[in-house]
Image: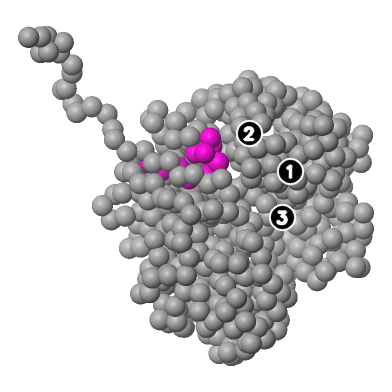
Amino acid sequence: MTQPTTFTCEKHPATGKRGMVATNHPLASAAGAEMLAAGGNAVDAAIAAFFTLTVVEPMMVGVLGGGMAHIRLADGRHIVIDGQSMAPRATGPTTYTPDPTAPPGTMDTIGRKNAVGPTSVATPGNLMGWTEALARFGTFPLADVMEPAIRHASRGFRVTPYLSECVTDCAADMAMDPEISKLYLPGGTPIAPGTRLVTGDYAETLRSIVREGPGILYQGSLGRHYADHMAASGGHIRMEDLTGYATITREALRGTYRGHEIVGPPPPSSGPLHIIQMLNILEGYDIGALGFGTPETVHLLAEVLKIAFADRAAATADPAFVKVPVEKLLSKDYAADRRARMTDQAQAWTAEVEPGELSSHTTHLTIADGMDNVVASTQTINSLFGARYIVPGTGMIPNNYMFVFDPRPGRASSVQPGKRVTSSMSPVIVLRDGKPKYALGLPGGLRIFPSVMQALSNLIDHGMTVQQAVEAPRVWTQGHALEMELGFGEAMFAALRARGHDVATVGNVAGGMSAIDFHADGTLEGAACWRADGTPIAIGGGLARAGVRFRPEATRT
């Protein structure tokens, strides 16, 4: 296997044997580590970290978002809790008018009605999904795991440069709402790094959830307040959308790549399905011998990405509404057929699957507790700061998940009442000989599953360390421009253009990846990359040896 020589890692991994928490903010990682240090398990740590992320990484995740939790229990079972958002009952295929001037592959609509404000919001699932995971598989009460989040919301925390930059990116939209502006645009300018940010309204909302549980949103006073605000501001969500929401426990999807088993959520999460599809195609090449970051390898990555995106657009959606051709997409024979038509030049690819009839902006955490429980979970409010407003008096930032649906009728992912969004979330756990070897994931919208696929190839084909794998330069395309991170260099850009690729250089592809490598001796190695504030925190040491106690008299002279 080859070792990478074209880039230098900016961060350092953490190692320990009693637990590992890797999230995209140090305070969230600390919240999870606090649960593990107190004797909790990986699920306790994950839920504590997520609630804390809603405070310290508010641009990425919130209780009014949606997501997928992938839990591997110590007994070997894989549990997928689908807490994805759903289209409100008042929406349908013609709710939005597509923007005829929008670039290819985008979901833009006239007036941005599906992107900003109350009309862009889908029925939330995060709060129910998190509390359900804790009740089923955690060991701590809700009050304990929410305490760090309440502490940081009420006492305040220091704004990072990353959070400040995200505010700058969204400032024009956020300025339209007085509630979100007074927190993140004080004096009309983006909040400065180092500022102590206190979110008192949100702290009280979190306290109310502790007192009354998730029912306060789905059946109670918080939900009624939310529905009333929606009705008054032109949004689509009504109380019946909240009372009718339920999570779904799904069977994990499985595939293989060079002796490793890839396990992750099934549709409506498209990520693992198309990761396995792409790896099946790549399996026919000696990627390790071709080398990391070579024109030959990057060309192959670009072509399999285009194939996957063509098939995803045609046939991957909520399986309650569309019969997704999972078996064909996972087929090694189908991969071989696609591979046989690949050449050393870029080409356009169309879908060769179709749906049957029925009878990026996100956050991710990766946690292991040292007791063989693992959580890889991706949650989001979709775009940076979601719908870019705050529900008055609550501190809650709603999602803008309606932007994920295709605004054109007759597509696999067109808007339909009660339909779950099709996401690219890819909280993946990789097994070797039936035991966890890697767990990883990241935020980044449509760039999530291509980035996870590349990280898996980095680990399996190129023999990278987990830190190298998450930080390595990435590429992305869905059939138009080939986005390449600057770390590849000018020579690579020229080589890919010579093969017919429309190369566009970008600062980063997708967001901060976190990952854990499970070493054979029981050591957990956690890593987070330079693209976000990711911080792995390891639990080492342990309790005193049995029978040992301090004897003051032994120190006398």
Vertical arrangement, residue 151 with respect to residue 386, above or below: above
Q: Is residue 25 visible?
A: yes
Q: Residue at x 31, y 43 (%)?
A: 17
Tell me the kind of residue under disc 1. Val
Vertical arrangement, residue 467 with respect to residue 105, above or below: above
The numbered disc on residue 421 is: 3
Q: SS for tag 2?
A: loop
Q: Position of residue 168 (x, y in %)?
A: 75, 45
Within-10-Å neighbours for mark 2: few <14, some 14–19, many 20+ = few
Q: Quadrant of residue 174?
A: top right
**Mark 1 in CB contact with mark 2 (< 8 angstroms):** no
What residue sits right under mark 1 in the picture?
A: 167
Q: SS for tag 1?
A: helix
Query: Range of the magenta residues?
Result: 19-29
Left or right? Give the position of 33 relative to 59. Answer: left
Q: Residue at x 29, y 35 (%)?
A: 541
Q: Nearer the viewer, mark 1 or mark 2?
A: 2
Tell me the kind of residue under disc 2. Gly
Left or right? Give the position of 549 relative to 456. Answer: left
Earlier residue among tags 3 and 2? 2
Q: Nearer the viewer, mark 3 or mark 1?
A: 1
Vertical arrangement, residue 212 with respect to residue 287, above or below: above
The numbered disc on residue 194 is: 2
Q: Position of residue 297 (x, y in %)?
A: 51, 79
Q: Position of residue 374 (x, y in %)?
A: 43, 47
Earlier residue among tags 3 and 1? 1
Q: CA distance from mark 3 to mark 2?
A: 36 Å
Q: Residue at x 61, y 29 (%)?
A: 157
Looking at this view, is 73 or 310 the one in front? 310
Tell me the kind of residue under disc 3. Val
Tell me the quadrant of the picture where the N terminus can be found.
bottom left
Q: CA distance from mark 3 to mark 1?
A: 25 Å
